[in-house]
Image (cartoon, rainbow, N blue to C red):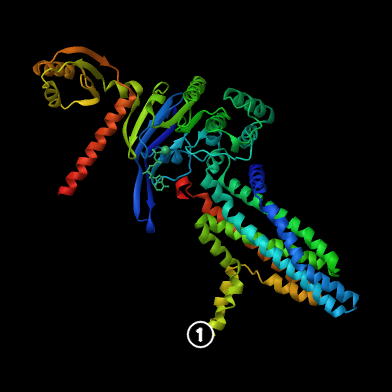
Amino acid sequence: MMVWLIAGIVLRRLLRSKLLGITLVIAILIFALLSSSLLMLRNARSAGDTEVANQLSANVILSALALMGFFACLVGLANGVTVIRREIREGTIFSVLSKPLTRAEYLLGSYIGSLVYLSFVWIIFGLLYLGLVYLTRQPMGKLLGLILLARWVYSVLMMSVAFFLALRFNAWIAVVLSVVVYNADSLYNIFPPLLRLVHVELPDWVKGTVLFLFPSTNSLDVLFESLLKARLNPAPVQWAFLSLIDYCAIMVLLAWVVFRRQELSPSTE
Amino acid sequence: MSENVIEVRELTKIFATGWGRKKRVEAVGDLDLAVARGEIFAFLGPNGAGKTTTINLLMGFLRPTRGSIKLFSSPPEARHVRSRTGFLPENYAFYSFLNGPQLLDFFGRLFRIPDRLRRSRIEQLLGQLDLWEARNLRIGKYSRGMRQRLGIAQALLNEPELLILDEPTSGFDPLGRRMVRQLLLQLKQRGSSIFLSSHILSEVEAICDRVAIVNRGKMVRQGSLKEVIGSHEGIEITFTDPGGSVRSQLQELNLKISAVSEQFMTFAGDEALGQHVVDAIRLGGGTLRAYLPVARTLEEVFIDLVGDQERARVSNTAGREEQ
Ligand SMILES: Nc1ncnc2c1ncn2[C@@H]1O[C@H](COP(=O)(O)OP(=O)(O)O)[C@@H](O)[C@H]1O
Ligand SMILES: [Mg+2]
């Protein structure tokens, strides 16, 4: 009950920001960016060149997803970092926390509010996505829906990581660390080859630990890219989703551990 | 069960700041406070004395370095404590995108006040605080005074048994101050306790039962208004000083002077000291024109006490530097 009240007020505050408007503009920009590909696609279709047409349509869908995912991650990052910090800085948090609600309720409410907001961003993007699927006549309907869902989960993951780190560190450090954590498994792939240059081989457990500690943000991408070419094998998709959602939950839990006993004073900002 | 709504023992708060958190600031040191049911307690001190820090500790926003805090015999975060407490922060800020009734409705829901009661109370409070006319105006467009009144309204929403206000009158015009005073007295009549901090003494003097004076995080004096003021009786004299030697005679008495001009002086002290002063004037060849014992204001007491402490501190540090 208290959680929903807080979530509602957080959502209302976020909706007053211009971010949704910007999302709409971004959606239109993405569409404009892909319009030449769409034209080429139509030409290829009318020329009867199915090979090229399929290639093009897959490209349009995947690049649209990449662009939308990138922007949504930025929104998630920004909201995750600011949602509670801003209330502390502006001082609105104090009159709220003096009411009979626990910090856990406040924290969860703020998180859910941001989550719903992020979902609004994805509703706009979802519509764009549906339009593109329709225009490119991509045949793999369900799978494409899954990819969209995966992108949404990625942006939620980014938001969750930022949400936790922003409580622990100052805003800019939190931003940088969030990006690092989010991309850890890609970044990690750079190190072994570099180390091999100086003849150092990392033991397996290092890789294991890194993959365990950081979210596997690449897994779904790699999976889907291969699936766009081959057939769908549902099991690993579910596992990859689950691991990402687990990661979000752990971030919220860690955020609570920090926030529970955090000292709140306007001058700490 | 104790009758004290606030009980603070040996409360100390040390902030670690700066690079590596090495610099330590003792914002509150060994503070003991007890606020009884139904009294208005003024927590006084100059800027930086540690009032806000104490209040943030009372509200559970900060954790004490040492010492204990009990509100209604429970820790500050306890749900029943929050339900019975109203709070106005020092630099209050409310969601600017809501209007007054919306904000109060939100807070009322957080207080779990039933729908009907909530609505009637909001209407009543907004009326009392002169905000009903502006009920459709977003808080972002409020004037400073309106915002302050809204702050008071949200603190009174749950008909609190304990009201904690951090510098409640600092943004008010005289009319607003009177309104706040009346509201506080009303609340007191219903048996609520009020804990308010201020650095402007004249505002709280009229309504408070007990005062605590803090400086640099330490308690300087605590007691009933009478105790604190009464112990610092003052005397006002008017005199002539034809030869100019009265002044030097008076200087030798080392008076605690709070107001002085060419032929007029107010100083702290009792009848005995007054007699010395009268003698000194005669000795200097002057005449006493008027002699008036005055009840000193809290303001003067405050300046005396805090001023004393500052002087002692300065001479202490000076002494240390010499060694
Ligand atoms: N979060 C903080 N970190 C470090 N020092 C602080 C913090 N909050 C307050 N202080 C210091 O504690 C002292 C008391 O401040 P405060 O409680 O705000 O005084 P008051 O409310 O009486 O004006 C000041 O010296 C202030 O600089
Ligand atoms: Mg203060």
Residue for badge 1 = A200
- Amino acid identity at mark 1: Val
In the rendering, at what x and y percent does residue A124 appear? Answer: 75, 56
In the rendering, at what x and y percent does residue A140 appear? Answer: 84, 69
Q: Residue B6: in sight, yes or no?
A: yes
| A215, B175: nearer the viewer | B175
Quadrant containing the N terminus of chain A is: top right
Against A165, is A238 above or below? Answer: below
B185 horizontally vs B216: left or right = right
| B179, B27: nearer the viewer | B179
| B114, A151: nearer the viewer | A151
Of the four image quadrants, the one with ligand 1 is top left
Q: Residue at x 86, y 76 (%)?
A: A44
For the residue carrying disc 1, how many other residues have a C-alpha within 10 Å: few (<14), some (14-19), or many (20+)?
A: few
| A107, A208: nearer the viewer | A107
Q: Residue at x 59, y 49 (%)?
A: A107
B277 horizontally vs A236: left or right = left
Identify the image quadrant of residue B215. top left
Marks counted in the figure total 1
Q: Residue at x 57, y 55 (%)?
A: A81
Against B58, is A17 above or below? Answer: below
Label 1 residue SS: loop
Against A12, is B263 above or below? Answer: above
Q: Is label 1 within 8 A of ligand 1 (CB to nearest ligand atom)?
A: no
Q: Residue A230: in sight, yes or no?
A: no
In the rendering, at what x and y percent does residue A260 appear? Answer: 52, 50
- Judging from the image, mark 1 belongs to the subunit labelled A
Q: Residue at x 21, y 13 (%)?
A: B291
Against B261, is A18 above or below? Answer: below
A12 horizontally vs B231: left or right = right
